[in-house]
Image: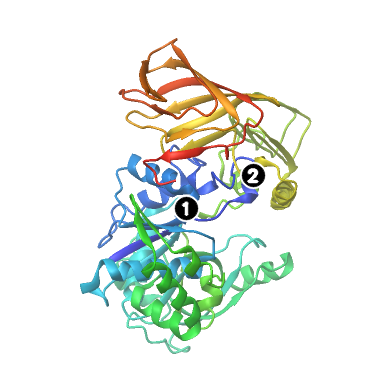
């Protein structure tokens, strides 16, 4: 059985201002109508022996992840919540332990397919073929990584150098045999470029400069490190215990001391935060003698920057990629994304312009890797634009700030059918609600009232209240807050369906 283990953590800072800490790129619709996370799961359809996925994500994203899975009719085996980010090795470790717990009778049969939630793969058939080749070697207790056959000297990726080629049996071929790749004809590799054999990993290489990257590409011996892996859960944990026993110990403790919470599993924070933050590359893959690289060509991109979105986008006659409403004059080789308003540009070449409701990014295409420096500046200065959008998603729906001044704030609130907010009160603000569409049940002190379109109510400071949508359509209302302090931390929750 193959269990997809989807790594859905991360903040995607290089795609700011579209990607934010509380709404990162894996949850965005960047290439089609589905999010990156949804596409990662949907591309597994049709694979043999594939199970429902295990998701590992940040606890702040849990309701958005659950909603995105529900909307594509996916019921995961588990959604594991990380209380703190510790890189990929601990995340994979807890996923492997959980998989073995869920299938205790199949300890030596479970193969994990490790997939980051924010990659693009265009050739799905070739990807499926590569996974089945990987499964052959994973069942021989090998630890597989999929290397991307490079087409340009990219400096933004790590590289992996291949060693001796392996037979289908897992034994190395003799260097003088001249039999490279013939064994893979037996593996039903029907699609052009689905793999170029399987090889012992010789070494991992850090991100190179341009000249070194050029040498790597021209040699044909190096491949981009995709961050996708495949191995038996039991074999990975055996190697992790050999090389990082302390990490494995705290991961086991975090699961043992964790708890179920609605549709999620919460790792124990006090245990998990003791783990060293480490990638699977450093923790295991660079040390193991069981490592295998399978080079693939599947139309892969990790969409790690605005430059990557320009590279993969559909271009107009001036080599521009345009999303949204844009008016251009003498603009070439640029990427423009308008979320809400018209972008007008004149006389630009090789630039990126990204417009959201609360921020606009302008940068040369060859400088977009430095966007993360801007995000760091925003965080250091306490600016909220690094963390959240003006529209904030909650398990019950969303709210969006329309206007804000020192003593008042106006929000547009959307409540999903059948959902309700927490029973709460505020010490520093009063609220006035006006229903725009749908039906609301409002708890106000000892009262319970029903409001429909164009009706309103007032919630005085300190009054216990709750908002609920009993209808079949979304409830839309305008909220006007007034008071001496309008922060989101002025909420005292007395009862909450979502365990906040």
In the rendering, which numbered label is found on residue 16? Answer: 2
| Secondary structure at numbered mark 2 | loop
User: Alpha carbon of mark 2 to alpha carbon of mark 1: how far?
Assistant: 21 Å
Residue toward you, 253 or 474: 253
* Mark 1 neighbour density, 10 Å: few (under 14) some (14–19) many (20 or more): many
Give the residue drawn at x 34%, y 39%.
71
Q: Is residue 2 above or below residue 400?
A: below
Which of 113 and 307 lies nearest the eye of the viewer?
Answer: 113
Would you say 268 lies left or right of 370 here?
A: left
Disc 2 + disc 1, Cβ < 8 Å: no
> Residue 230's x, y, as percent?
40, 69
Within 10 Å of the Cα at label 2, are there few (<14), some (14-19), or many (20+) other Cα atoms? many
Q: In the image shown, does 179 or 285 lie closer to the viewer?
A: 285
Q: State how many labels appear.
A: 2
Seen as rendered, the residue at the extreme right is 347
- Is disc 1 placed on a helix, strand or loop? helix
Q: Read off the residue under disc 1.
A: 59
Q: Look at 36% across and 83% down and name the residue there.
A: 170
Q: Up-down: is 54 above or below 37?
A: below
- In the rendered view, would you say 113 is above or below 26? below
Q: Quadrant of the N terminus?
A: bottom left
**Res. 19 in view:** yes
Can residue 147 be seen by looking at this rendering? Answer: no
Whichever of callouts 2 and 1 sits on the residue coming sooner in the sequence is 2
Q: Position of residue 84 (x, y in %)?
A: 53, 60
Using the rendered view, name the quadrant where residue 2 is placed.
bottom left
Q: Residue 359 — which label?
A: none
Residue 465 % position (x, y): 44, 28
As drawn, which residue projects farthest toward the top?
454
């Amino acid at each position: 059985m193959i269990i997809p283990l989807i790594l859905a953590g991360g903040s995607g800072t290089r795609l700011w201002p579209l990607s934010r800490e509380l709404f990162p790129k894996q949850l965005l619709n960047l290439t089609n109508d589905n999010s990156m996370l949804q596409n990662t799961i949907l591309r597994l359809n049709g694979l043999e022996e594939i199970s429902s996925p295990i998701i590992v994500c940040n606890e702040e994203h849990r309701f958005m992840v659950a909603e995105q899975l529900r909307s594509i009719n996916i019921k995961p085996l588990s959604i594991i919540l990380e209380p703190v980010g510790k890189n990929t090795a601990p995340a994979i470790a807890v996923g492997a332990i959980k998989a073995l717990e869920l299938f205790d009778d199949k300890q030596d049969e479970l193969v994990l397919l490790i997939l980051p939630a924010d990659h693009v793969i265009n050739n799905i058939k070739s990807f499926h073929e590569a996974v089945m080749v990987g499964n052959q070697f994973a069942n021989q207790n090998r630890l597989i990584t999929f290397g991307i056959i490079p087409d340009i000297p990219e400096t933004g990726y790590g590289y992996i150098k291949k060693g001796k080629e392996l037979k289908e049996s897992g034994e190395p071929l003799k260097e003088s045999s001249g039999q490279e790749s013939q064994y893979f004809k037996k593996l039903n590799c029907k699609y052009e470029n689905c793999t170029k054999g399987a090889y012992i990993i010789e070494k991992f290489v850090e991100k190179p400069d341009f000249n070194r990257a050029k040498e790597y590409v021209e040699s044909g011996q190096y491949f981009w490190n995709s961050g996708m892996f495949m191995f038996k859960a039991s074999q990975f944990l055996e190697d992790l215990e050999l090389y990082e026993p302390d990490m494995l110990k705290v991961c086991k403790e975090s699961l043992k001391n964790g708890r179920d919470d609605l549709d999620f599993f919460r790792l124990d924070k006090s245990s998990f935060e003791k783990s060293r933050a480490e990638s699977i590359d450093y923790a295991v893959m660079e040390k193991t003698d069981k490592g295998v690289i399978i080079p693939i060509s599947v139309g892969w991109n990790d969409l790690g920057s605005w430059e990557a979105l320009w590279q993969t986008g559909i271009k107009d006659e001036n080599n521009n990629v345009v999303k949204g409403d844009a008016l251009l004059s003498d603009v070439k080789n640029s990427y423009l994304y308008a979320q809400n308003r018209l972008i007008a540009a004149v006389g630009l070449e090789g630039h990126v312009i990204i417009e959201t409701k609360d921020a606009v990014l302008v940068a040369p295409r060859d400088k977009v890797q430095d966007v993360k420096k801007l995000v760091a500046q925003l965080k250091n200065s306490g600016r909220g634009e690094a963390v959240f959008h003006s529209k904030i998603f909650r398990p019950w729906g969303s709210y969006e700030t329309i206007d804000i001044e020192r003593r008042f704030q106006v929000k547009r609130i959307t409540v999903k059918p059948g959902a309700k907010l927490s029973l709460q009160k505020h010490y520093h603000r009063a609220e006035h609600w006006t229903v725009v569409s749908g039906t609301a049940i409002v708890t106000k002190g000892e009262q319970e009232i029903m409001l429909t379109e164009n009706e309103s109510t007032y919630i005085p400071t300190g009054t216990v209240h709750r908002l609920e949508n009993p209808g079949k359509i979304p409830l839309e209302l305008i909220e006007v807050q007034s008071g001496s302090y309008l922060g989101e931390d002025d909420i005292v929750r007395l009862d909450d369906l979502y365990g906040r």
